[in-house]
Amino acid sequence: MTLQETTVLHNGLKMPVFGLGVYKIPDEQQGVEAIVHAIKTGYRLIDTASLYDNEAAVGEAVRQSGVNREDIFVTSKVWNTDQGYEETLKAFEVSLEKLGFDYLDLYLIHWPMPKTDKFKETWRALEKLYQDKKVRAIGVSNFNINHLEDLKTTATILPMVNQVECHPHLNQQDLRAYCQAEGIKVQAWSPLKRGDLFELDTLTEIAKQHQKTVAQVILRWDYQHGILTIPKSVTPSRIEENANIFDFTLSETEMNQIDALHNGDRTGPDPEELNA
């Protein structure tokens, strides 16, 4: 069990179970340095998006890392204002140009935007990109069960990944069970709830028992649940700490204790409400 561990998507592609999220790292130099450090630490998945305005930094860091492009799994996402068939195809080319790549490993619809109701057309564009071999895998982000059910009515390819807000306060149990039954991998964004969980007694006690940090306990909880995870940090020591979760195991009792922390609280928007 290492940072190079992968899971197999339903199209047979291997995807790292652990990666680096780069949300809100707009400073290019800081971004390049953080991503290069993560890759040197052993990270093999970098998750960006057109919204984050750092795709160029991701591409530069991959080139500077000394690791072959094909050995690093890079995800990006189409933003809400670029939804629609032609718009998505154009947005993809812009992202690819910023990254300086000739293909992406995974491309996601960032939000379902149900009131705009363009995600089925957007998905059709992702299917074309996949069939044209410009993307090795396609998926969605922030899709609830009802959005996935709606997408199934027109999709010819099911999403391979659904990236959603997921942490002990929002454990997405029903959505995870649905996705597992459909062969869709769930990946957690904001897995540490931006630090809001670090003082919880349950987590601090479990961390103390294992001589680990609360962050490591949460990320291990992800791992043992089969949740792919992408904690964000620009601090070298934190990048290393977050990845150091493969030398201990949470007991069934501890997993249940963490599961019981669920209260439905979010840090981000409700996918049913966001429409901008």
Image (cartoon, helix red, strand yellow):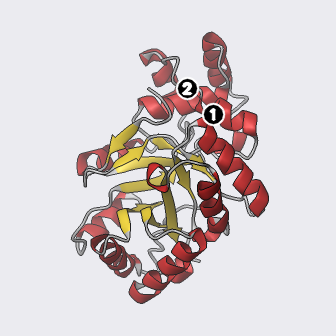
- Name the spot of residue 63 as percent of width and height, x first: 60, 58
**Picture quadrant where residue 24 is located:** bottom right
Using the image as rendered, state which of residue 203 and residue 32 is in the foreground: 32
- Name the spot of residue 232 as percent of width and height, x first: 65, 47
Q: Is residue 202 above or below residue 8?
A: above
Callout 2: helix, strand or loop? Answer: loop
Q: Residues within 10 Å of mark 1 (few under 14, many from 20)?
A: many
Relative to 227, 154 lies left or right: left
Q: Amino acid at mark 1?
A: Asn
The residue pinned by badge 2 equals 245
- Name the spot of residue 218 as percent of width and height, x first: 57, 31
Quarter of the picture containing the N terminus is top left
Q: Amino acid at mark 2?
A: Ile
Q: Residue visible at 73% across and 50% down?
A: 33
Callout 1: helix, strand or loop? Answer: helix
Residue 73 visible in rendering: yes
**Picture quadrant where residue 212 is located:** top right
Q: How many marks?
A: 2
Using the image as rendered, state which of residue 79 and residue 105 is in the foreground: 105
Q: Residue visible at 32% across and 50% down?
A: 179
Q: Is residue 259 above or below residue 92?
A: above
Mark 2 and mark 1 in contact? Answer it, CB < 8 Å.
Answer: yes
Q: Is residue 248 above or below residue 182?
A: above
The residue pinned by badge 1 equals 242
Q: CA distance from mark 2 to mark 1?
A: 7 Å
Relative to 107, 238 lies left or right: right
Using the image as rendered, state which of residue 68 and residue 24 is in the foreground: 68
Using the image as rendered, state which of residue 37 and residue 75 is in the foreground: 37
Q: Residue furthest top?
A: 209
Q: Residue visible at 55% across and 55% down?
A: 47
